[in-house]
Image (tube, coloured by chain):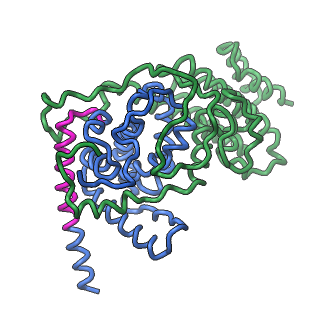
Amino acid sequence: MNDEREPLSPEIDAFLDVERRRPAPPPEIQDALFSRIGATLGWPNGSGPGGNGGSTPGRSDPSDAAPGGHFGGGAHLAAHGTKHLVAGSLAKTLATLAVGGVLGAGAHEAYDRTHDRRPVPVLATAPAPARAAPASAPPELPVAPPVPATQPPPAPPAAASARADTTAAKPGREPRGEAREHDRNLAAERALIEQARTALARDNGAAALAVLERHARDFPRGELEEERESLQVQALVGLERYEQARKAGARFHRRFPLSIFGAVVDEALKSIP
Amino acid sequence: MGGKSSSQSPNAGTAPAPVAVDFPSLYKQEFAYAWRTLRRLGVRERDLPDLAHDFFIVVYRRLADYDPARPIRPWMFGIAFRVVSDYRRSSRFAREALDDAPEPVDDAPSIDEQIADRQAREQVMRVLDALDLDRRAVLVMHDIEGHPVPDIAAALTIPVATAYSRLRLAREDVTAAMKRLQARVAREEGRA
């Protein structure tokens, strides 16, 4: 530490020392969480934006995960416990959802790239994460292809004019409030979409529809509207509400004629007997 | 400064080369730091996976904002602070405050050492829980992680003088809480 203004008392120092030695979390947690993050962000096999990412059991061959690609197969399903499902009667649903999942991941990532206010760094050639480095490991972060930071972090305010006020404004709210709100909304949207996808994977179309209706109510102009409507078609087909499914499919194609989910919607409609 | 420790932040106060950072590598190298930081800021054990998930999603989305000329950990800490602020305002935090899961055990040290360390860490957490989040964040960053106060001020977007003030008040709070804890332990031992 490079400031010497307020020495820490030996008592507090000793008291806190055990916390400084807190062990690293188990690597399984790290791997599992990375898969979950990957599922949320739509990475192939939950492994990482640039390819295979570690030791999650059952992960496909690293070569499956093309850099920057999103078609490694079953990312969302793998990450949401569908491994516990029995194939058999659900095989068809799973196949459809797997396609939908990866297409959704790809579409959403593509959407992010074109719509997000904060450019996503180039991750294509990044090595996959393995295990947690020890806490004391020097964090010399590997280099990605050069991507200049678009916005510098806030500069430290001038100390001289600062008032030592313990009730200072909460940090970061004003300048980034909008971005935070955006993140929160998107997280909430994603959560609902994931719930719907999981319900579909469990062959519970009614629950999926309920969640999707909630999404429509809460986020009528949400960023995942396209994904929601494609899932609605699949849910309606699963519930054998074929006429509604056809209408929803037609509406989907009208609204999103170039959608990447179009194939999934068509696949679901084709399965109508 | 007190609180120096070999386990303190290795990059506190250092300026890495200005390079872009890719998310998987960042995740790999800083996962443990993030996990510990969230815990130290008061996230319950059982909520850590969810909060770590949310934290890294934000990190991913904000990575382009990060200035590689500055140390990464204070920047990450600033995000963790905001994630935890939201969490602590949630009903989930209030509901589970009295019912936390036990800290997982490590298989490296002996059982006795693990138990002793875990109990000691629980005491630290209890003491830290007595602090409000603003003070707690500064204390954690400075006295546990070893970040310099100017970096803390930048990460939390507060004036440097405010950071020093919070550090001083946090230490007073810790001292008072330690005394209360010691008195309670003494009472319990007296009863036993």
Question: Which quadrant is the C terminus of chain B positioned in?
Answer: bottom left
Q: B12 or A258, which is in the foreground?
A: B12
Q: A176 or B160, which is in the foreground?
A: B160
Write the residue at 67% across / 30% down: A231
Where is residue B75? Give x, y as percent.
38, 35
Specify the chain shown as blue: B
Q: B63 or A106, which is in the foreground?
A: B63
- What tint does the image give chain A? green
Write the residue at 78% across / 23% down: A266
Write the residue at 64% across / 25% down: A229
Q: Is residue B172 magenta?
A: yes
Q: Is residue B167 magenta?
A: yes
Residue extent of the magenta highlight: B156-179
Q: Check the image and report above or below for A130 versus B173.
A: above
Q: Check the image and report above or below for B83 versus A263.
A: below
Where is residue B166? Give x, y as percent.
20, 45
Q: B164 or A47, which is in the foreground?
A: B164
Where is residue A251? Give x, y as percent.
68, 17
Where is residue A165? Give x, y as percent.
14, 38
